[in-house]
Image (cartoon, rainbow, N blue to C red):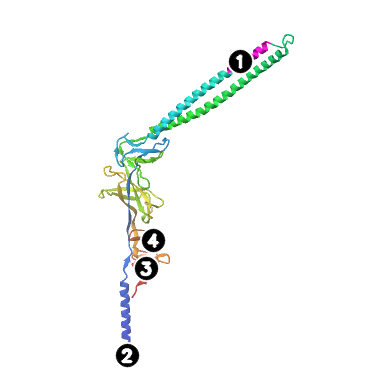
Amino acid sequence: MRRVAIIGVPIVLLVVAGAAALHRKEKTIPLYRVQATPFVRRVTAEGNLKAVQAAPLSAPLDAPEVLKVAWIVEDGDFVKKNDVVVRFDPTDFEKELLLGNEDREIADNNITKSNVDASTTRVNLRRDAKQADHELESARRFKFDDAEVFSRYQRIEAEVDAELASERKKHAENVLAVRKGLARANLDILGIDDKRAALRIRNAEQGLRSIEIRAPYDGIVVLQRDWRGDVARVGSNIWSGQPLGEMPELASMKAEVFVLEADAAGLAIGKKATVMLESDPTRAFSGRITQFDKLARQRLRDVPVQYFGVTIALDHSDPRLMKPGTRVRAVLDLEDRARAITVPRQALFEKDGKVIVYRRQDGAFKPLRVEIATSSAGRVVITRGLNEGDELALVDPTEQKD
């Protein structure tokens, strides 16, 4: 009996030691107790201010050809109403006007010459026809058909003269009709040259009227930048209707910011936002989202990061501080739940393509599948699978070693 008791003591000691080791192992796993708390998700975005309303500054639509910038205001300059904002080079239009006037003068001279030539030809042909008619009338009046009085030769000659006079009259009348047709065709051709010259003059005059763009009201000029970030400069070629810039109304501003694609979940019209000026971060302006892109896009070429463009309408503006193009930083309130079950990201694991947590139950950790919603930088909203009071492992208990 004493030997059995001696052997049993080590066994008991081993069981107690094993239980203590298991207890110490469980104690080394950090736990999180689930509870419903308010959940707010905010994301930051950067962008620029832009005027809600602005008068566009574009090249005239009736400009007949490419315009070349001779002078342009600096970006951000203040101008008065009717001040010249852009002036184009008039040299080409002045040259075209001179050549057009020369073409018109040549066409007018050719038309005058053609009219004179046609009039002279008509007078001559009418005179020939009249002369032939007189000869035909004389031949008919004085007959040489009396064989007893006139010789055969005289009778034949009289018949030939009468027939020749008749043919000369017909020929003159036919040539007169043909000449009239040719004169009309020639005048039509010369009329085309005259119209071409008139069109050249009109285009030149339109170009001269379009060489200046003036300010519609007092304000600053914001020049438009191309995809390279450049504005129009002296010597730039501008097409008809091409936008050059705008004159914003500073009384009402909006913010155009860019949200990372990874942070864009929950973007919706009407969400609250707070905008801070980079030049004065102490001032904050409240607003709401009024528009956002449906598809993410790159902001910079050769940079694969995708962003969603977001437009924020500000509740009020301060023209003394706010200028178009001013850099801003915005904080967007994308989600605000009064009560939500949230867990740290460390408590979530992925097994076989499913999101699970390890819930402590009856002294052991058992895997449990959960459904997640939105998330912030460190917390995730759980919509199904957990209740308040559940204890979750913050590390994978199946990977713990002795």
- Closer to viewer: mark 4 or mark 1: 1
Count the marks: how many? 4
Residue at x 47% of width, y 31% of height: 196
User: Crowding near pointer 1: few (<14 within 10 Å), some, many (20+)?
Assistant: some
Query: Which of the two residues, 344 or 240, is positioned nearer the viewer here?
Result: 240
Label whose residue precedes the other's in the sequence (4 or 2) = 2
Residue at x 38% of width, y 70% of height: 366
Which portion, as a residue range, is magenta?
Answer: 126-142
Residue 200 screen position, x and y as percent: 44, 32
Disc 4 and disc 2: Cα gap in Å? 60 Å
Q: Is residue 201 visible?
A: no
Label whose residue precedes the other's in the sequence (1 or 3) = 1
What number is the disc on residue 3? 2
Q: Quadrant of the C terminus?
A: bottom left
Query: Which of the two residues, 353 or 279, is positioned nearer the viewer here?
Result: 279
Q: Which residue is mark 4?
A: 372
